[in-house]
Image (tube, rainbow, N blue to C red):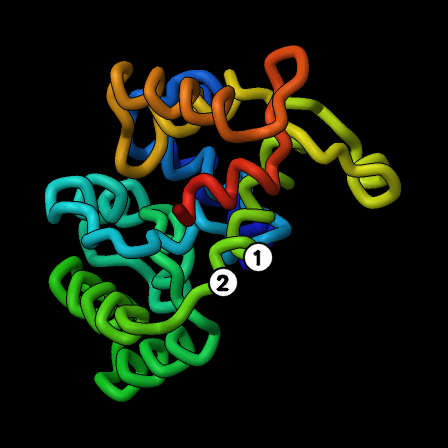
């Protein structure tokens, strides 16, 4: 889980980007996802499900934000940088990476070493069965918290069953594998034809089922 201190540290290195508005920048997109997933680290947008790793150019761009001195990132930052790229790593995996790096008597990790860790992480995740319905709850909670502006107490005590279709389109057009305008309109059409909708909102459970068809 991204700890508050790690999140603040990462935000401080994102060069003043508006994390909730400048979602066209790859670093801002991934940082926004981290904010959505702050309390729910294994939601679908964080897991990079069935997706390839980001290309090396994007990985290096994010890596350099944490490697201010050009000596590599600190060993303890491996998980933070991975999650900033939308790559899920279990605590067990992270501990293994940290031990491997420590065995080399180093406190920093180079970019190529970091890429190797990411590839190991992706390889171990491939083939694992994932409960999409459970994982998608993180996305719903993120939308309620950062789009609907609901307090943790409101989310806990009376969570709405639906989310705004516009918010879904906004996220899917700006984060991860971005959808085109045509794809978004087709998705919105499918939502209205196959899901319970009211006043521009869709029942989230229906939306998840639609994704699994």
Label ID, residue 23: none
Q: CA distance from mark 1 to mark 2?
A: 6 Å
Q: In the picture provided, is 20 more to the left or to the right than 100? A: right
- Crowd tier of the residue under label 2, counting other residues whose Cα lies within 10 Å: few below 14, some 14–19, many 20 or above: few
The number of callouts visible is 2
Identify whether 125 is placed above or below 100.
Answer: above
Q: Secondary structure at mark 2?
A: loop
Q: Is residue 213 at least partly visible in the picture?
A: yes
Label ID, residue 134: 1
Q: Nearer the viewer, residue 100 or 125?
A: 125
Q: Which residue is mark 2?
A: 131
- Crowd tier of the residue under label 1, counting other residues whose Cα lies within 10 Å: few below 14, some 14–19, many 20 or above: few
Q: Residue at x 37, y 23 (%)?
A: 23
Determine the image quadrant of residue 179. Answer: top left
Q: Is residue 2 at least partly visible in the picture?
A: no
Q: Residue at x 35, y 84 (%)?
A: 99
Identify whether 68 is placed above or below 203.
Answer: below
Q: Which quadrant, please, contains the N terminus?
A: bottom right
Q: Position of residue 174 (x, y in %)?
A: 35, 25
Q: Nearer the viewer, residue 23 or 72?
A: 23
Q: Residue furthest bottom?
A: 103
Q: Residue furthest front?
A: 193
Q: In the picture provided, is 11 more to the left or to the right than 120? A: right
Q: Position of residue 208 (x, y in %)?
A: 51, 43
Determine the image quadrant of residue 205. Answer: top right
Residues tagged 1 and 2 counted as in contact (Cβ below 8 A):
yes
Q: Position of residue 15 (x, y in %)?
A: 36, 27
Q: In the picture provided, is 151 more to the left or to the right than 17? A: right
Q: Residue at x 28, y 23 (%)?
A: 183
């Amino acid at each position: 889980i991204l700890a508050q201190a790690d999140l603040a540290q990462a935000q401080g290195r994102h060069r003043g980007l508006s994390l909730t508005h400048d979602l066209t920048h790859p670093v801002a997109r991934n940082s926004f996802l981290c904010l959505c997933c702050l309390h729910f680290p294994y939601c679908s947008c964080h897991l990079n499900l069935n997706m390839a790793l980001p290309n090396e150019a994007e990985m290096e761009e994010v890596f350099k934000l944490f490697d201010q001195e050009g000596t590599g990132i600190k060993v303890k930052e491996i998980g933070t940088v991975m999650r900033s790229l939308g790559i899920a790593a279990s605590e067990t995996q992270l501990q293994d990476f940290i031990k491997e790096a420590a065995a080399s008597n180093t406190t920093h990790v180079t970019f190529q070493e970091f890429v190797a860790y990411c590839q190991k992480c992706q390889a171990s995740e491939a083939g694992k069965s994932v409960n999409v319905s459970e994982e998608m709850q993180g996305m719903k909670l993120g939308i309620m918290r950062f789009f609907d502006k609901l307090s943790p107490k409101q989310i806990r005590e009376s969570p709405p069953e639906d989310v705004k279709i516009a918010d879904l389109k906004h996220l899917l057009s700006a984060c991860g594998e971005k959808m085109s305008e045509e794809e978004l309109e087709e998705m919105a059409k499918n939502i209205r034809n196959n899901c319970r909708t009211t006043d521009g909102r869709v029942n989230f459970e229906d939306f998840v089922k639609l994704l699994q068809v």
